Amino acid sequence: MGFQSAASIHHQAEAKRLAFEDRAKWFADERFSRTPVEYLNSKAYAAERAALIRPDRVMDRAFPGDAPTQGDTTYFSVADKDGMMVSWIQSNYRGMGSGLVPDGPDGSTLGFMFQDRGELFALTDGHPNVYAPGKRPFHTIIPGFACKGGEPWMAYGVMGGGMQPQGQAQIIINMVDYGLDPQEAGDAGSMRGLPSPRAIRQKASAPCSSRPESRRRRRLNWRPWAGSREAPMAGSVAIRMWSGR
């Protein structure tokens, strides 16, 4: 790109748009925020954002990036030789949750904190989820359990906020409709619907053959799978019964 050429000016302008979106989302007093400065300044993140810039067109709209934040949801499933199964999930929601640690009957601290998901109450009068004394709020915590023929079949779960019901449905589809085992179903490509009706984020492990056909229907946002850096895509755990055991 030449000095002050159209291409140079275009790339600078697009880079500024992306940077300002990140600024609006993340910039704050570091004493009061958990801005992931190291990741935002990394070459990996810069490359990810730079890949959004098209040399031949202006982005319709710039969005802030998905720099990793600290998740706190923990899920596990267990089963014994007799077929007893447990699907268990725990999350404080915001960091340390409510900050309240309960005491046991003998006065000793029980060692876990109450969550603070009351933040998810609606504040609009008449809304089904409006706050009220003794009322439980909407939340995304879903320990999954599946039965087959009226008998326990699988204890499973997905972590990642609103990804949980989407991920659980995809695991069931992968296993029931396509014959994958629990490991294959969890490792397979997954997708997460975004607020835009025409946008989907999809794990890069999804078959490349699905991309052209999918793009004819929706605008897909393809992202590489990078473990905890892709927290919105989450992870999964599953134990399935086999021949009654």
Image: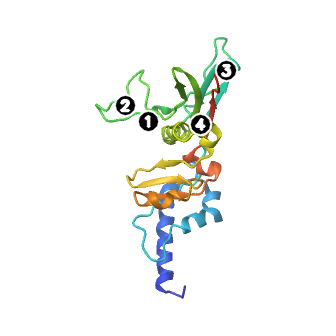
Q: Residue 73 got which mark?
A: 4
Q: Are marks 1 and 2 in contact (CB under 8 Å)?
A: yes
CA–CA distance between discs 1 and 2?
8 Å
Q: CA distance from mark 4 to mark 1?
A: 16 Å
Q: Earlier in the sequence, mark 4 or mark 1?
A: 4
Q: Can you tell which mark lies on residue 129?
A: 2
Percent x, y of residue 102? 60, 21
Residue identifier under label 1: 120
At mark 3, the secondary structure is loop
Which residue corresponds to mark 3? 109
Question: Relative to residue 215, is residue 8 depicted above or below?
Answer: below
Tell which circle, 2 or 3, labels the residue nearer the N-terminal end: 3
Residue displayed at 47% across by 58% down: 220
Of marks 2 and 3, the one in the foreground: 2
Q: Nearer the viewer, residue 197 or 17?
A: 197
User: Circle 1: is it few (<14), some (14-19), or many (20+) Cα within 10 Å?
Assistant: some
- Dot 1: element: helix
What residue is shown at x 44% (from left), y 50% (from top)? 194
| Residue 111 horizontal side relative to residue 189, left or right | right
Mark 3 / mark 4, whichever is N-terminal: 4
Q: Are marks 4 and 1 in contact (CB under 8 Å)?
A: no
